[in-house]
Amino acid sequence: MIPASIPSPPADWARFVIGPFTIHAYALCILTGIVVATIMTSRRLTKRGAQPGVVVDFAIVAVPLALVGARAWHVFTHVGDYFGPGHAWWEPFAIWQGGNAIFGSVLGGAVGAYIASRWTGIRFLSFADAVAPGLLLAQAIGRIGNWFNTELYGIPTTLPWGLEVPTTNPAFPAGLPAGTLFHPTFLYELVWNAAGAILILLIDRRVPLRWGRALGLYLIWYGIGRSVFEAIRIDPTTVLLGLRVNIWAALGAVLLGVLIIAWSVRRHRGAEPGVYRPGRGWTPDAPVVSRYTAADFDGEPPVDQAAAATSGAASRR
């Protein structure tokens, strides 16, 4: 039986206390998404010849920069909420009070991934193609956190899956009666992103998406969905030329995705030679070479028996 509406969770579900620590449900959703995306990307890269565990090198750089980018984008698209009279200087940095943006996360994460690609020798586009479906799935999981916070909902609706929002909610529009239902735009985006992840995986299985084509498809898919869902959201944000700034960002993502795919098809018609750049490959069965000096030992260094036998045999000839 289809419920009459989607209830918002009790306010105390958004956070819980363990000793001196306050744990936020939104943060747990974000962390879960990061873990899922990391595991998926690792498996996809390893299957294509990358060194097992190399994705951790990317995560070490990309995840912190993604978090910084997410916060920075949110702050600069909500300037009035953080700067000016009545606002403390530290408020833009108070991430525990909420406020992150996916577009900033993608930009920051892309910078981190590029840095890690130079570090590890893995092609940036190879990593981008590997992470694309996991990134969509991570974003879908992150949207569950918006339900816990009762945020990012859309205009009023009479549809049976409308979201119940208490009148005490800061974003509840003034003048609307209690019991008004709203479009659960975070749920729409969750479903859209999960479907996009499945689509990329299915296409990649039949026609390998290489040279940035999975990245391009990710940008197109996410940009189309976000531009639609963003148009019916009612949370305050910066408006530029009559459109919410995130709609412009979404349209820009679609355009960038199209350009990447067009460039890829024109520039790279053959198969990808490997995930590593020339001269930076990894060989699974390469021998481990150890070199010692006398300083590594307290007394005399150990004798390499094989080398001694070979040397002795040579001297007896």
Image: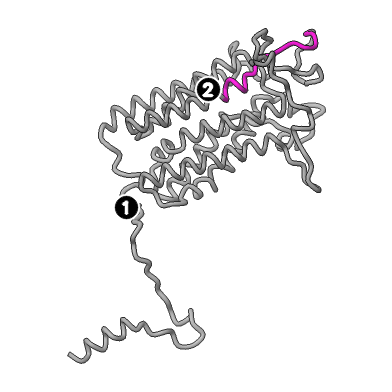
Q: Which residue type does callout 2 highlight?
A: Trp
Q: Which of the marked residues, 1 or 2, is nearer the chain's N terminus?
A: 2
- Classify mark 2: helix, strand or loop: helix
- The image shows residue 72 at horizontal and vertical percentages of 63, 33
Name the foreground residue: 278 vs 10.
10
Residue 201 is drawn in which quadrant? top left
Q: Mark number for residue 279? A: 1
Name the foreground residue: 60 vs 252.
60
Is residue 20 rendered to the left or right of residue 95? right
Q: Residue at x 40, y 47 (%)?
A: 46
Residue 131 to residue 299: above or below: above
Within 10 Å of disc 2 (Cα), the crowding (few <14, some 14-19, many 20+) is some
Q: Which residues are magenta?
A: 176-190
Q: Which residue type does callout 1 highlight?
A: Gly
Furthest residue toward left: 317
Is residue 300 rendered to the left or right of residue 241? left
Q: Residue at x 51, y 49 (%)?
A: 56
Q: Residue at x 67, y 22 (%)?
A: 152
Name the foreground residue: 69 vs 46.
46
Name the image quarter holding the C terminus.
bottom left
**Number of the front mark, 1 or 2:** 2
Residue 66 to residue 156: above or below: below
Furthest residue toward bottom: 316
